[in-house]
Amino acid sequence: MTKLLLSVHVLAAILTIGPITVAASLFPRYARDAPGGRAGTAAFLHRICRGYSVVGIAVPVFGLATGAQLGVLTDAWLIVSIVLTAIAAAVLALAILPGQRRMLALPEGAAPGQARRWAARLSMLTGAFNILWAVVVVLMIVRPGSTTGV
């Protein structure tokens, strides 16, 4: 059962977090160049982020189930990973997705400087989101204090 849970956890992470990181990273460039949501590409990238973020809930669910099965829920590396995952989810839900919506809602005649500022902020937030996930991945692989010999 542990192998199945771990497999679903890893597949869910690859198939959901990967598209979110790519779409969120590309969004500011496309939205900045077409204020008012005229660009179908920016709207499409936002839909990817929004849709995959809902499905991405499977990642921590199966991660916790795997951790429970392995008996490592109290290990420091897993607790840090859980906290970082929660922070990444909050950045996505409370800053990135609303920021994308705001950029798509900019009126067509909006000042180019405003679109550039918002795009720069979204790029920074997306970079933080991506770094958080990178750290979680490293913690999942290295597992400090693990007895697996890694």
Image (spheres, rainbow, N blue to C red):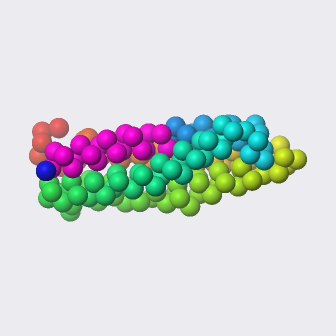
Q: Identify the image quadrant of residue 42.
A: top right
Give the left or right position of residue 112, taking residue 32 as reference. Answer: right
- In this picture, residue 15 sits left or right of residue 24: left
User: Could you say which is closer to the camera, residue 45 or residue 146?
Assistant: 45
Q: Is residue 123 visible?
A: no
- Marker count (numbered): 0
* Left or right of 105, for residue 11: left
| 72 or 7, nearer to the observer | 7
Specify the quadrant of the image occupied by residue 99. bottom right
Residue drawn at the location 16% of the way across and 45% of the way down: 3
Residue 132 visible at all? yes
Q: Residue at x 49, y 44 (%)?
A: 20
Residue 103 x/y as whole percent: 71, 50
| Chain part drawn in magenta | 2-20
Which percent across, then down, holds residue 52?
Answer: 47, 48
Instruction: Report the predominant secondary structure element of the magenta stretch.
Output: helix
Q: Is residue 51 magenta?
A: no
Which quadrant would the C terminus be assigned to in this image?
top left
Q: Residue furthest right?
A: 109
Residue at 19%, 46% in the rendered image: 4
Residue placed most toward the observer, 54 or 83: 54
Q: Residue at x 12, y 42 (%)?
A: 148
Residue 50 placement (x, y as % from top left): 54, 51
